[in-house]
Amino acid sequence: MSVLKNKRRTSKIEYEKNFLGFYEYMMNLIDHMPKRWSKPLGAPMKEALNRMYDDVLLVSEMYIEQEQNKKRYLQCRKVVEELTAFQELVCLYWNLSDGRNGIKWADADRRRYMSIYLNKEIYLMAGLMIKLDHQKKFGAIEVSYLKPFQKKDIDGVVFLQKLYELNELVYTKSIRIPLAIRDEEVTLACRYIRNAFYSAYTANSTIPSTKREYERRRKLFGEAISDMYRLNRPMTKLFMVHMFSNEDMETITDLVTESTKLLQAVQNTDKELYSGLP
């Protein structure tokens, strides 16, 4: 593990123990990835895990006296936001672990196991935030839990199918681009595509029954659409320097166009169905 040895210790605090288990489990998966995936997928996952490890320990190191409660609350909030962001990388790992890409297949049990670890950590941190009681001053945070899925679970949702295909195509093609010319545009393209799938998947996971749930779903679909539009700049530059074949370019363009139209159609339908909710 890349975390310094002197930072590791046996903990009696539940959120520390849970995160350490999650950290070790994920690091083991990352260390067994094929070398070609170490930079585009393994590196950002390791970076995020190490950052969260330090931040979780910092929550414990802060004193519980009243004057430290505010800082501790904000530190907990930071960890929850990092855990929520990490869900995107977990979804990407699942999307790419279909056996064709050389990444070990994440079956239903493995996905459920990863989700339990991650969701429990979010739950424990959110619970500590409630205990510290600074929601009124700093505002409540929107807590999002990861729902495990497999390819068959999204096959009936056309826009998720398109985004799934887009994720796999761009990531698998990008690892073939020589490291010397892999630049910011490849990183941006992969990030926007990853974000779009996660936002759309999360939005689709809940059928709104309240105005608040509808607004959250609308916001997530809006973020996915925005990422599709943002994708235009890096992909245009990559097409211009022939980083993808003509066939791949056509497929990517079609997937982006179709995904965007489908997401916009869902937003319009949602407005008719849910905008009047109490």
Image (cartoon, helix red, strand yellow):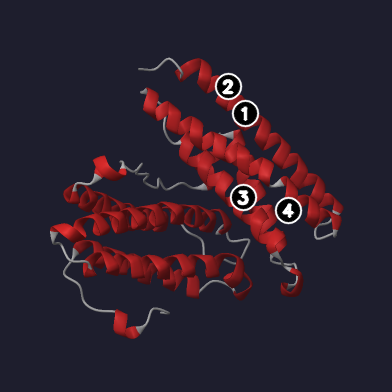
Q: Do the residues labelled 4 and 3 touch (CB within 8 Å)?
A: yes
Q: How far apart, in angstroms, are the residues tagged by discs 1 and 2?
A: 6 Å
Amino acid type of the residue that numbered disc 1 sits on in the rendered structure: Gln
- Dot 3 falls on a residue whose secondary structure is helix
Badge 4: residue crowd in 10 Å (few <14, some 14–19, many ≥20): some
Residue 78: image quadrant is bottom left
Q: How far apart, in angstroms, are the residues tagged by discs 3 and 2?
A: 22 Å
Determine which residue is flagged by label 4.
Answer: 234
| N-term mark: 4 or 2 | 4
Q: Do the residues labelled 4 and 2 touch (CB within 8 Å)?
A: no
Q: How far apart, in angstroms, are the residues tagged by discs 1 and 3?
A: 17 Å
Amino acid type of the residue that numbered disc 3 sits on in the rendered structure: Tyr
Badge 2: residue crowd in 10 Å (few <14, some 14–19, many ≥20): few
Determine which residue is flagged by label 3.
Answer: 192
- Dot 4 falls on a residue whose secondary structure is helix
> Whole-percent x and y of residue 125?
26, 54
Amino acid type of the residue that numbered disc 2 sits on in the rendered structure: Asn
Report the side of 238 relative to 262 (left or right).
right
Determine which residue is flagged by label 2.
Answer: 268
Q: How far apart, in angstroms, are the residues tagged by discs 1 and 4?
A: 22 Å
Residue pictured at 57% horizontal, 26% vertical? 266
Residue pictured at 84% horizontal, 56% vertical? 245
> Whole-percent x and y of residue 71?
26, 59
Q: Are marks 1 and 2 in contact (CB under 8 Å)?
A: yes
> Whole-percent x and y of residue 53?
35, 69
- Dot 2 falls on a residue whose secondary structure is helix
Badge 1: residue crowd in 10 Å (few <14, some 14–19, many ≥20): some
- Residue 50 appears in the figure: yes
| N-term mark: 1 or 3 | 3
Determine which residue is flagged by label 1.
Answer: 264
